[in-house]
Image (cartoon, rainbow, N blue to C red):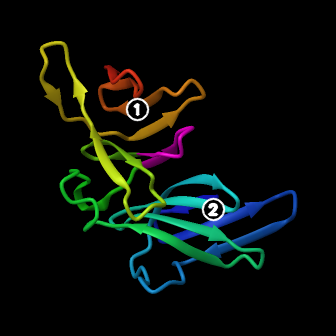
Amino acid sequence: WICSWEGSLTLVNLDERIQASWQGLNDATSFKEFSPFSIREAGNNKYWLGLWGKGIVEFQLKQDLQIAPLVHINEEMMKGTTAIENIVYDIDMDADNNLWIGTPYGALKIKNPESPNFTIERQTNRVPDGSNTQYEAFSVLCDRAGLVWIGTMAGVSLLDPYAAVFDP
Protein backbone atom coordinates (compact mmCIF):
# COMPACT_ATOMS: atom_id res chain seq x y z
CA TRP A 1 0.00 0.00 0.00
CA ILE A 2 1.20 3.50 -0.83
CA CYS A 3 -0.43 6.57 0.68
CA SER A 4 0.02 9.75 -1.33
CA TRP A 5 -0.13 13.31 -0.09
CA GLU A 6 -1.54 14.29 -3.49
CA GLY A 7 -4.75 12.40 -2.86
CA SER A 8 -4.45 8.82 -3.92
CA LEU A 9 -4.15 5.40 -2.36
CA THR A 10 -2.30 2.75 -4.35
CA LEU A 11 -2.13 -1.01 -3.95
CA VAL A 12 0.78 -2.85 -5.57
CA ASN A 13 0.87 -6.64 -5.37
CA LEU A 14 3.99 -7.91 -7.14
CA ASP A 15 3.15 -11.59 -6.60
CA GLU A 16 -0.17 -11.32 -8.43
CA ARG A 17 0.96 -8.46 -10.70
CA ILE A 18 -1.88 -6.20 -9.57
CA GLN A 19 -1.81 -2.45 -9.32
CA ALA A 20 -4.86 -0.42 -8.39
CA SER A 21 -5.23 3.21 -7.40
CA TRP A 22 -8.06 5.21 -5.85
CA GLN A 23 -8.52 8.99 -5.85
CA GLY A 24 -11.18 8.86 -3.12
CA LEU A 25 -13.55 6.55 -1.32
CA ASN A 26 -16.86 5.55 -2.87
CA ASP A 27 -19.32 6.28 -0.10
CA ALA A 28 -21.93 8.76 1.07
CA THR A 29 -19.37 10.98 2.81
CA SER A 30 -17.51 11.50 -0.50
CA PHE A 31 -14.15 12.79 0.65
CA LYS A 32 -13.54 15.73 -1.64
CA GLU A 33 -10.02 16.28 -0.33
CA PHE A 34 -8.68 12.75 -0.04
CA SER A 35 -5.18 12.72 1.45
CA PRO A 36 -4.33 9.32 2.91
CA PHE A 37 -1.33 9.59 5.21
CA SER A 38 -1.06 6.20 6.95
CA ILE A 39 -2.58 2.74 6.71
CA ARG A 40 -2.83 -0.32 8.97
CA GLU A 41 -4.14 -3.78 8.09
CA ALA A 42 -6.84 -5.06 10.45
CA GLY A 43 -7.33 -8.53 8.89
CA ASN A 44 -10.04 -10.03 6.66
CA ASN A 45 -9.23 -7.52 3.90
CA LYS A 46 -10.06 -4.66 6.27
CA TYR A 47 -7.80 -1.65 6.73
CA TRP A 48 -7.68 1.51 8.83
CA LEU A 49 -6.67 4.60 6.91
CA GLY A 50 -5.42 7.80 8.56
CA LEU A 51 -6.37 10.88 6.53
CA TRP A 52 -4.78 14.31 6.61
CA GLY A 53 -7.57 16.54 7.90
CA LYS A 54 -10.41 14.01 7.59
CA GLY A 55 -9.95 11.62 10.52
CA ILE A 56 -9.81 7.85 10.30
CA VAL A 57 -11.65 5.46 7.99
CA GLU A 58 -11.97 1.71 8.13
CA PHE A 59 -12.54 0.14 4.74
CA GLN A 60 -12.74 -3.29 3.20
CA LEU A 61 -11.05 -4.26 -0.05
CA LYS A 62 -13.42 -6.44 -2.07
CA GLN A 63 -12.42 -9.14 -4.54
CA ASP A 64 -13.16 -6.86 -7.51
CA LEU A 65 -10.73 -4.30 -5.99
CA GLN A 66 -13.57 -1.97 -4.98
CA ILE A 67 -13.24 -0.19 -1.65
CA ALA A 68 -16.17 -0.32 0.76
CA PRO A 69 -15.91 2.18 3.65
CA LEU A 70 -17.19 0.73 6.92
CA VAL A 71 -16.45 3.22 9.72
CA HIS A 72 -15.50 6.92 9.67
CA ILE A 73 -14.22 8.53 12.86
CA ASN A 74 -14.26 12.23 12.07
CA GLU A 75 -13.61 15.60 13.71
CA GLU A 76 -17.03 15.75 15.37
CA MET A 77 -16.43 12.39 17.06
CA MET A 78 -12.92 13.39 18.19
CA LYS A 79 -13.98 16.61 19.97
CA GLY A 80 -12.20 17.07 23.26
CA THR A 81 -9.32 14.77 22.35
CA THR A 82 -7.05 17.49 20.92
CA ALA A 83 -6.79 15.66 17.59
CA ILE A 84 -6.45 19.07 16.02
CA GLU A 85 -7.89 19.36 12.53
CA ASN A 86 -8.23 15.57 12.27
CA ILE A 87 -4.58 15.24 11.29
CA VAL A 88 -3.41 11.63 11.57
CA TYR A 89 0.33 11.04 11.21
CA ASP A 90 0.39 7.35 11.98
CA ILE A 91 -1.90 4.51 12.97
CA ASP A 92 -1.34 1.09 14.54
CA MET A 93 -3.40 -1.58 16.26
CA ASP A 94 -2.63 -3.45 19.47
CA ALA A 95 -3.42 -7.09 20.31
CA ASP A 96 -6.80 -6.03 21.78
CA ASN A 97 -7.76 -4.37 18.45
CA ASN A 98 -7.51 -0.86 19.90
CA LEU A 99 -6.23 1.79 17.51
CA TRP A 100 -3.26 3.94 18.45
CA ILE A 101 -3.11 7.23 16.56
CA GLY A 102 -0.19 9.65 16.21
CA THR A 103 -1.35 13.28 15.97
CA PRO A 104 0.23 16.76 16.21
CA TYR A 105 -0.85 16.93 19.86
CA GLY A 106 0.05 13.50 21.10
CA ALA A 107 -1.08 9.91 20.88
CA LEU A 108 -4.69 8.78 21.04
CA LYS A 109 -6.00 5.35 21.94
CA ILE A 110 -9.36 4.41 20.41
CA LYS A 111 -11.00 1.50 22.22
CA ASN A 112 -13.49 -0.64 20.28
CA PRO A 113 -13.15 1.44 17.09
CA GLU A 114 -15.69 -0.65 15.14
CA SER A 115 -18.38 -0.17 17.80
CA PRO A 116 -20.75 2.83 17.83
CA ASN A 117 -19.77 3.12 21.53
CA PHE A 118 -16.03 3.49 20.92
CA THR A 119 -14.03 5.64 23.33
CA ILE A 120 -11.04 7.89 22.68
CA GLU A 121 -8.34 8.42 25.30
CA ARG A 122 -5.56 10.94 24.99
CA GLN A 123 -2.26 9.52 26.20
CA THR A 124 -0.23 11.97 28.27
CA ASN A 125 3.47 12.00 28.83
CA ARG A 126 3.94 12.45 32.59
CA VAL A 127 7.39 13.74 33.42
CA PRO A 128 9.21 13.21 36.77
CA ASP A 129 7.93 16.50 38.30
CA GLY A 130 4.35 15.20 37.80
CA SER A 131 3.38 17.63 35.04
CA ASN A 132 2.04 16.59 31.65
CA THR A 133 3.88 17.58 28.51
CA GLN A 134 2.52 18.18 25.03
CA TYR A 135 4.33 16.28 22.35
CA GLU A 136 3.84 15.60 18.68
CA ALA A 137 3.40 11.86 18.03
CA PHE A 138 4.85 11.30 14.55
CA SER A 139 4.82 7.52 14.72
CA VAL A 140 3.32 4.76 16.84
CA LEU A 141 4.22 1.09 17.01
CA CYS A 142 2.49 -1.59 19.09
CA ASP A 143 4.82 -4.51 19.74
CA ARG A 144 4.07 -8.16 20.56
CA ALA A 145 4.71 -7.57 24.27
CA GLY A 146 1.85 -5.04 24.39
CA LEU A 147 4.10 -2.00 24.66
CA VAL A 148 3.46 1.11 22.58
CA TRP A 149 6.43 2.98 21.12
CA ILE A 150 5.78 6.63 20.25
CA GLY A 151 8.18 8.65 18.09
CA THR A 152 8.31 12.36 18.99
CA MET A 153 10.55 15.36 18.31
CA ALA A 154 12.19 14.68 21.69
CA GLY A 155 12.92 11.04 20.83
CA VAL A 156 11.13 7.77 21.46
CA SER A 157 8.74 7.30 24.36
CA LEU A 158 7.63 3.91 25.61
CA LEU A 159 4.15 3.35 27.02
CA ASP A 160 3.02 0.27 28.91
CA PRO A 161 -0.77 0.64 28.67
CA TYR A 162 -1.42 -2.21 31.13
CA ALA A 163 0.70 -0.68 33.88
CA ALA A 164 -0.14 2.93 32.90
CA VAL A 165 3.60 3.72 32.82
CA PHE A 166 4.98 6.24 30.33
CA ASP A 167 8.77 6.32 29.95
CA PRO A 168 9.95 9.40 28.05
Above or below: residue 128 compared with residue 122: above
Name the residue: 19% across, 35% down. 134
Q: CA distance from mark 2 to mark 1?
A: 24 Å
Residue 147 locus on image (x, y percent): 48, 26
Which quadrant, please, contains the C terminus? top left
Specify the label residue 72 is tagged with: none
Residue 91: in magenta span: yes
* Foreground tag (2 vs 1): 2
Pointers 2 and 1 in contact (CB under 8 A)?
Answer: no
Above or below: residue 11 compared with residue 38: below
Label 2 is placed on what type of residue?
A: Lys
Question: Which residue position holds label 2?
Answer: 46
Label 1 is placed on what type of residue?
A: Ile
Name the residue: 31% across, 32% down. 153
Which sits in the foreground, 19 or 88? 88
Above or below: residue 126 compared with residue 59: above
Question: Which residue position holds label 1?
Answer: 150
Name the residue: 57% across, 68% down. 59
Which quadrant, please, contains the N terminus? bottom right
Residues rendered magenta in the picture: 90-100
Residue 161 locus on image (x, y percent): 40, 28
Q: Quadrant of residue 53?
A: bottom left
Q: Residues within 10 Å of mark 1 (few under 14, many from 20)?
A: many
The residue tagged with tag 1: helix, strand or loop?
strand
Residue 32 locus on image (x, y percent): 40, 82
Name the residue: 33% across, 20% down. 165
Which sits in the foreground, 130 or 39? 130
The mark that comes first in sequence, 2 or 1, is 2
The residue tagged with tag 2: helix, strand or loop?
strand
Q: Residues within 10 Å of mark 2 (few under 14, many from 20)?
A: some
